[in-house]
Image: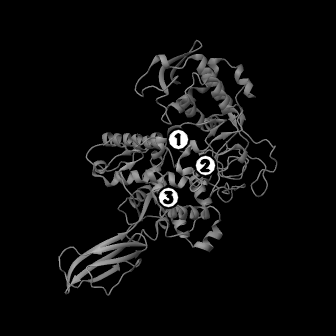
């Protein structure tokens, strides 16, 4: 319900005022004292995204004739009062506790079980990341999620997480209020608790689909859960960690300055594709990786750091650590790692033998154990990892620690056009040759990395397409929709329109998406025409415009982006 105070201000002594408030369409209801003659009226509006005609007359003369629309307000989660936070968390817990049949029976046809949302994001058919589909797919996915959670409790305050606000915590990022027991539970989980979260989501389970019949288009782990082929964890429960092979990552949240830099870049070049690259690499960045964790590794990164911390920068080491499971995926794709296609489980999705072997291992010639890595030459190890250092150096805001070099001499072998780490952080635009890591130190890192990616152990679900298994997923992504609203509403950015210049091989503007008109009902209405049951990107882009009748929400504000005050509607950047 939305309570509004309506007041006639067009005259000082209006006399008796007659009020009339009616929905302009079939939906919507409002309650007010229709008998009052006061110039001030309290009205309670119901039903989001519903238009109401508001009229006021004095002596038969119409003095007010306006239209108002009620919308939900998406608010930064920590600005919501404790009572409404709890209400949101309880509804989210309920959504993750029941299946589709039970949910529909209890809450109606708008309920969608979390398993279906996990499978949709885990699809191999569409590319939700790494291209412009990021801008249309995630807002649409959020709509499906919010329709479901609102079917449980229609009075919720819809929430998002501006994770950039936590950049001020630095190395203590894992102490954010977001990870409190009253919200999403800790990321600093414990080995003795099998890296399970405590609090509301302690009992959340992985989505088990052993025969791939229920979700045939989704990725699956060898144990039959939704996820990735390189993910071999035996736990049937949600796992989350900030520890990587025994090393606590200190790589905190990105700052709001990263977001502003992306906006400034777009203002300069109006290149929509490059804006996506900037948002995903500089703002979204390590968001998934830093909540995944990695354990049961063949080497201990904590011990390695303690032994070499005199010269090894802790932040650089964190950047390298959190990306290791992703690098194993690249090695798997390139044939250097093999993973079992399936591992035996019991019918309920638990490991039938905790001592059984279900892990990825080296398929690299001559490397059958971690110790075999030590038998390679320095140049051989470097050769296996040149693409790895490029992957690390071109992502995760690593440009202060890893630099491109036209050539690098590794023990007498010259490697051309490579990325190499620095001993310590340097200015992004500079190359300080004195700080480039020498052969001995780099080779120590190379040995550690190879042993880790070739014999990786286990990692958390947040690193995979099945990331929505973790309810934290749903408050992470609206900040990018908020950014898109700012872009599309501000003449400063939207004056020349938005050109869908996606990379080849990815979703085109007229490509079909997995989203339908029904996802946006009852708000979409008859005014928007679509050509088929599934929406094209072009149709989706129109529907999710902030002024669209299908968009049932607005954002709390557009001037706070993490720890930076930035007004996208001003005439210049304010940093």
Disc ID at residue 286? 1
Circle 3 residue: 142
Instruction: Write the residue at 57% across / 30% down.
Output: 317
Going from N to C along the chain, the mark reached first, 3 or 2, is 3
User: Tags 3 and 1 in contact by the CB under 8 Å rule?
Assistant: no
Left/right placement of residue 376 relative to residue 144 reads: right
Q: Please tell me whether mark 3 or mark 1 is closer to you in this view.
A: 1
State how far apart marks 3 and 1 are (Cα).
Answer: 20 Å
Element type at marker 1? loop
Camera-side residue: 146 or 196? 196
Q: Is residue 42 above or below residue 195?
A: below
Mark 3 or mark 2, whichever is nearer to me: 2
| Secondary structure found at label 3 | helix
Q: Is residue 410 visible?
A: yes
Compare marks 2 and 1 and give the one earlier in the sequence.
2
- Give residue 153's position: percent from left, percent from top: 53, 69
Residue at mark 2: 186
Q: Residue at x 57, y 33 (%)?
A: 318
- Whole-percent x, y for residue 460 in the image: 64, 45
Q: Is residue 16 above or below residue 556?
A: below
Name the foreground residue: 122 vs 424: 424
């Amino acid at each position: 319900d939305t309570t509004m105070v309506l007041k006639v201000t067009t005259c000082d002594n209006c006399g008796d005022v007659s009020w009339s408030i009616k929905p302009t369409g079939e939906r919507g209801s409002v309650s007010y004292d229709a008998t009052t003659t006061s110039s001030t009226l309290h009205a309670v509006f119901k039903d989001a995204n519903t238009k109401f005609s508001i009229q006021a007359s004095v002596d038969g003369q119409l003095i007010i004739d306006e239209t108002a629309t009620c919308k939900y307000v998406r608010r930064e989660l920590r600005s919501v009062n404790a009572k409404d936070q709890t209400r949101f968390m309880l509804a989210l817990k309920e959504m993750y506790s029941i299946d589709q049949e039970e949910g529909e029976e209890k809450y109606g046809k708008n309920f969608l079980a979390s398993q279906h949302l996990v499978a949709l994001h885990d699809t191999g058919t569409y590319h939700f990341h790494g291209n412009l589909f990021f801008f249309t797919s995630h807002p649409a996915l959020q709509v499906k999620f919010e329709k479901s959670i609102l079917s449980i409790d229609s009075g919720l305050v819809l929430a998002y997480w501006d994770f950039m606000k936590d950049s001020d915590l630095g190395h203590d990022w894992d102490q954010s209020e977001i990870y409190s027991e009253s919200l999403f539970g800790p990321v600093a989980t414990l080995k003795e608790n099998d890296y399970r979260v405590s609090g509301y989501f302690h009992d959340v389970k992985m989505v088990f689909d052993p025969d791939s019949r229920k979700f045939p288009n989704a990725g699956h782990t060898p144990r039959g859960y939704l996820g990735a082929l390189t993910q071999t964890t035996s736990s049937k429960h949600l796992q989350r960690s900030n520890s990587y092979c025994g090393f606590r990552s200190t790589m905190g949240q990105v700052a709001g300055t990263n977001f502003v830099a992306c906006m400034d870049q777009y203002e300069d070049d109006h290149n929509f594709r490059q804006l996506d690259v900037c948002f995903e690499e500089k703002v979204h960045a390590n968001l998934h990786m830093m909540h995944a964790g990695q354990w049961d590794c063949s080497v201990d990164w904590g011990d390695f750091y303690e032994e070499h911390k005199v010269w090894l920068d802790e932040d650089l080491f964190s950047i390298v650590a959190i990306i290791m499971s992703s690098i194993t995926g690249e090695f798997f794709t390139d044939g250097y790692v093999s993973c079992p296609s399936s591992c035996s489980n019991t019918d309920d999705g638990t490991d039938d033998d905790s001592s059984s072997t279900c892990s990825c291992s080296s398929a690299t010639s001559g490397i059958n154990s971690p110790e075999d890595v030590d038998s390679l030459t320095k140049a051989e190890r470097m050769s296996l990892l040149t693409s790895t250092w490029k992957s690390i150096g071109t992502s995760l805001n690593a440009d202060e620690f890893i630099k491109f070099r036209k050539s690098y001499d590794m023990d007498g072998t010259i490697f051309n056009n490579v990325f190499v780490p620095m001993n310590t952080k340097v200015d992004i635009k500079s190359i300080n040759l004195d700080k480039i890591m020498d052969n001995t130190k780099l080779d120590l890192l190379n040995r550690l990395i190879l042993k880790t990616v070739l014999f990786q152990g286990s990692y958390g679900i947040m690193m995979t397409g099945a990331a929505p298994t973790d309810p934290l997923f749903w408050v992470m992504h609206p900040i990018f929709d908020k950014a898109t609203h700012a872009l599309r509403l501000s003449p400063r950015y939207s004056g020349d329109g938005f050109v869908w210049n996606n990379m080849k091989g990815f979703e085109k503007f007229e490509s079909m998406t997995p989203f339908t008109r029904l996802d946006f009902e009852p708000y979409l209405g008859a005014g928007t025409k679509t050509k088929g049951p599934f929406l094209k990107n072009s149709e989706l882009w129109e529907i999710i415009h902030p002024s669209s009748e299908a968009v049932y929400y607005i954002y709390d504000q557009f001037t706070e982006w993490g720890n930076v005050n930035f007004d996208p509607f001003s005439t210049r950047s304010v940093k």
